[in-house]
Each structure stands twice: as structure tokens, then as C-alpha cells.
């Protein structure tokens, strides 16, 4: 099993003023894999074994089901037990209107994932969603001025990757998206 791709090392200052290095493991899960909690635990112990650092784990669940909500791995055998609990964020829990109104750039990323699920087999619909998201990004003025270009570039890259469309629609998207 390869190392998780969603691993980042970040340096934080705690409220006490102490500086702390923390590993952040982000795992994006798009389907209802029953082995997902076990995989989260495997990544945790491999990260801990390799770096010996505190780790924050976040599962981003992009599937469109209500019932799949894994946030714990539990294993028990002959009196020995282990429970690993991790953070879980379910995209399905948020309404489109709430995400559209939000000034948080992550809301657009969540909306993109929801649109990707909704347009799996419809390229034209995916194209319309992609245009809508690009326009939203360009119209939002609430991003901090210094970081505005970074937010915009990152969101466009993410949306472009998530909502892939055929070449003819790509050309059409970029012609329409110009400010």
C-alpha cells in the first residue's frame, strides 16, 4: 500500500504560544467502501511509525449516500481491542444553497464534488456545472486580496480536475469563462 497522497506537514502555534509540528492526513473517499475505516487506521499507524508525530486525520466523503458515515475503526480479538476515531466531513450534508451563499472557498470545492456526483454520466450537465462554478469563483470578492489569486487558481485547478469534460467542451468553457 503506497503512502497516502493527502499528507501534509504543518507548523502551528498553539494558544499557549508553543510551536508544534503536526501531520495532517486527508483522505478523499468517493464510494461506500466497507474497508475504508481499516485503510484510515493503516495510514495512521504507518504515518506515526515513520514520523513519530501527532497526526490529524480527516476523511472527506464525497459519495451521495446518507448512510455511509465511517469515522471509526474498531478491532477486537481475545481480550485485546483497538478503537481509532478520526474526523469525518460528509459533503452530502450540505445543501447547494448554503454552499453557494458561503464566502468560504472550501464551499466551492464541496459544491464541485456534489456536482461531479450529480453529473457522472452527463457531459453537458458537467459542462454547465463547471461554467457555473468558474463564474462563482470569479464573482466572489470576499477572498483576502493577497491570497485571491492563489484561491482562484487552486479552485479552478480542482474543479477542472474533478469535472472533466471532452476537449470540445473544454474549449467552449474557456471562451465563456474569460472575465
Image (spheres, rainbow, N blue to C red):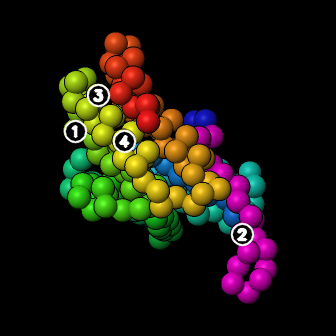
Label count reads 4
Depth check, mark 4 against mark 1: the one in front is 4
Residue 153 image offset from top left, x and y in percent:
55, 40
Tell me the CA gap for discs 4 and 1.
19 Å
93 vs 124, nearest the viewer:
124
Residue drawn at (24%, 47%) of the image: 64
Q: Residue furthest front?
A: 179
For marks 3 and 4 on the same chain, the one whose residue lies earlier in the sequence: 3
What residue does disc 4 label?
135
Residues at marks 3 and 4 touching, judged by CB atoms closer than 8 Å: no
Does the stretch in magenta take in 11?
A: yes
Side of 64 where 175 appears, left or right: right
Task: Name the residue tied to disc 1.
Answer: 118
**CB atoms of marks 2 and 1 within 8 Å:** no
Where disc 1 sits, the SS reads helix
Labels 2, 3: front one: 3
Q: Residue 173, which numbered label?
A: none
Foreground residue among 105 and 42: 105
Which numbered marker is on residue 12? 2
x and y percent of residue 48 in the render? 68, 57
Q: Which residue is mark 3?
A: 127
At mark 2, the secondary structure is strand
Task: Measuring from the top left, give residue 90's x and y in whole percent.
Answer: 34, 57
Q: Residues within 10 Å of mark 1 (few under 14, many from 20)?
A: some
Q: Residue at x 77, y 83 (%)?
A: 17
Residue extent of the magenta highlight: 3-21
The location of residue 125, given as percent across then percent down, is: 21, 30
Residue 68 in magenta?
no
Amino acid at each position: 500500500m503506497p503512502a497516502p497522497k493527502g499528507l501534509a506537514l504543518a507548523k502551528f502555534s498553539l494558544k499557549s504560544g508553543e510551536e508544534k509540528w503536526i501531520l495532517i492526513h486527508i483522505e478523499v473517499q468517493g464510494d461506500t467502501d466497507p474497508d475504508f475505516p481499516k485503510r484510515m487506521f493503516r495510514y495512521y499507524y504507518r504515518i506515526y511509525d515513520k514520523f513519530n508525530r501527532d497526526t490529524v486525520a480527516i476523511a472527506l466523503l464525497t459519495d451521495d449516500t446518507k448512510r455511509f458515515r465511517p469515522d471509526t475503526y474498531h478491532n477486537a480479538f481475545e481480550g485485546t481491542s483497538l478503537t481509532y476515531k478520526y474526523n469525518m466531513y460528509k459533503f452530502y450534508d450540505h445543501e447547494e444553497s448554503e454552499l453557494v451563499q458561503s464566502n468560504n472557498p472550501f464551499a466551492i470545492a464541496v459544491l464541485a464534488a456534489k456536482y461531479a456526483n450529480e453529473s457522472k454520466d452527463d457531459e453537458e450537465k458537467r459542462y454547465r456545472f463547471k461554467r457555473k462554478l468558474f463564474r462563482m469563483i470569479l464573482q466572489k470578492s470576499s477572498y483576502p486580496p493577497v491570497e485571491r489569486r492563489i484561491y482562484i487558481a487552486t479552485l479552478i485547478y480542482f474543479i477542472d480536475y474533478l469535472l472533466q469534460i471532452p476537449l470540445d467542451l473544454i474549449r467552449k468553457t474557456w471562451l465563456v469563462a474569460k472575465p
